[in-house]
Amino acid sequence: MKILVAVKRVVDYNVKVRVNADNSGIDLANTKMSINPFCEIALEEALRLKEKGLADEVIVVSIGSSKCEEQLRYSMALGADRGILLETDSTPSSLYCAKLLSKMVEKENPGLIILGKQSIDSDNNQTGQMLAGLCGIAQGTFASELTIEGGQVIVTREVDSGLQTLSLTLPAVITTDLRLNEPRYAKLPQIMKAKKKPLETLSAETLVAPFAPQVTTQRVDAPTQRKAGVKVANVEELINKLRNEAKVIS
Amino acid sequence: MNILVIAEHNNQQLSSATYHTVTAALQLGSTEIHLLVAGHECAPAVQQAAKINGLSRVLVADFSAYQHFLAENIAPLIRDIAQTHYSHILAPASTNGKDVLPRAAALLDIEPISEITNIISANTFTRPIYAGNAIATVTTNAPIIAMTVRGTAFDAALTSEESVATIEAISIQHDNQLSSFVNEALSLADRPDLSSARVVISGGRGMQNGENFALLEKIADKLDAAIGASRAAVDAGYVANDLQVGQTGKIVAPDLYIAVGISGAIQHLAGMKDSKIIVAINKDEEAPIFQVADYGLVGDLFEILPEIEHRL
């Protein structure tokens, strides 16, 4: 079985982002970029399945400019067998990404497609579900545990009310939540070795004809800041303020 | 302009998120708002739905394939209903809504909008990006506008004593058999729901272990509060993941939020900064949580918590 993992290049999660001066977006100049943390968890899960002998090949795919090669090389250093860059200079919408990935599913015929549940830049949480819909296959979103038994994947999902377990027919799309696993780090010899692994570049526009995005960003603003209040001296003063000033307890 | 709202429920009861989503639909300025209740043996949820002010119809799709709200079956149902004559589809930005709505949108060949927090016009909305560190204003020209709605950004819709909406049965059945329900481990419901509680008391790494959360529970009992936790406390294994408040957990906006032993990482603040009153209790007076707290108390939580309980 092949596993296809989608990885996105995003602002590193440790970077404190700032809205740019003309309110058109986030200031990305000289910003450290990394693999989206949820995508890293997706890759880790694929690698563990391969190490258990449940998969033969792990393919990483990324959509974006040639700079995404950096994240694909890093993914191969972690253990992915080969990489595919679907190159485009525009900012692709979730629908366009889902259509591109569905072409890859058609071409590679993977048993599992694992994606992060959301990227930490646009926070959309859409692409995996849209891909599963376009392919007409099952989806297990917000996965915190998964096992493969026969032609099924048993996935435990982190839902608002607790945990829900579903059984999905393969092939299926899985989107990862934070507690699925803890990703490994790449070691230097692996980083060297990854330079020799195959990385294929395809033109996104050739695969799926581009279309005008339906959803466009008009402006981006910094959120309103909450003002710090007062420090109280003791519990008595705190209870007194909550009762008589804020009036939130009786 | 007809608006379709997707109800979230467990067949017995509508979730509070559903009421908040109806309010967002009302703000779009339509008089024709229909609520889809898809489930199995869901008559009690339908009865509650029919009493929500502002709804003109409750559409009921009651089949066994819809019992667990599996996306593989619900998404094509939404597609079939929506493409008849709806301008907007709204679902709560809950794990259910986020699971189903994008899949339905893909089937309709449209780009959905996630987790809106404000409605500027019928096609322009705001939504948080970068973990709430920026707010984007987005416009869509999609033929059908599909979106999930952040519950805490909209008040709950009001209800009437008697039914106000017409109940209409939907006969569309989808049973793809791609997925099946195995089991669920639900958190105990002896407290108010975290997402809709009036008071929330949360513990962080400062609680030191899971047993110490009993100190929060005693106060929660007196305030009828829900218990929450920071990601650090969840990752350390003190409490279950469904108690997590933050960008990757639940978004809450209660009247009173009490953060105990929580330093105030940006991830956590994104989940609670819209609370009306925030209280922070922390031994580190430099903790960032104090920058957003209305009332801060510096000290040892193991001394402070019993005293609060005693004085309430």
Image (tube, rainbow, N blue to C red):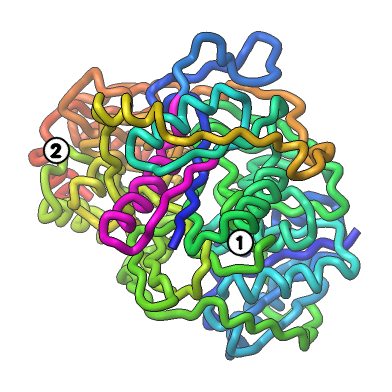
Going by the numbered disc 1, the residue's amino acid type is: Ala
Residue A10 visible to an observer of this rendering: yes
Residue under label 2: B301
Residue located at (90% from left, 66% from top): B85
B275 or A190, which lies in front? A190
Q: Quadrant of the N terminus of chain B?
A: bottom right
Q: In the drawing, does residue A135 fall left or right of residue B86?
A: left
List the residue tagged with mark 1.
A132
The kind of residue on which mark 2 rests is Leu
Residue B47 seen: no
Query: Both on one chain, marks 2 and 1?
Result: no
**Viewer-nearest residue: A144 or B161:** A144
Residue A167 percent across, percent down from the top left = 44, 76
Q: Is residue A221 above or below residue B217?
A: above
Question: Which residue is drawn at the image coordinates 51% and 29% (left, top)?
Answer: A10
Output the chain of dot 1: A
User: With respect to residue A125, does B280 lie above or below?
Assistant: above
- Label 1's element? helix
* Residue A208 located left or right of residue A150: right
Q: Secondary structure at mark 2?
A: helix
Dot 2: few (<14), some (14–19), or many (≥20) neighbours within 10 Å? some
- Looking at this view, is B118 or B179 the one in front? B179
Chain for mark 2?
A: B
Q: Residue at x 51, y 22 (%)?
A: A225
**Badge 1 density bin: few <14, some 14–19, many ≥20, Cα 10 Å:** many
Q: Which residues are magenta?
A: A34-61
Tell me if residue A70 is in the magenta stretch.
Answer: no
Instruction: Locate residue A157: give its quadrant.
Output: bottom left
- The percent position of residue B246, horizontal first and vertical second, equals 40, 42
Between marks 2 and 1, how big is the CA–CA gap? 47 Å
Q: Is residue B229 above or below residue B132?
A: below
Residue at 33 percent across and 37 percent down: it is A78
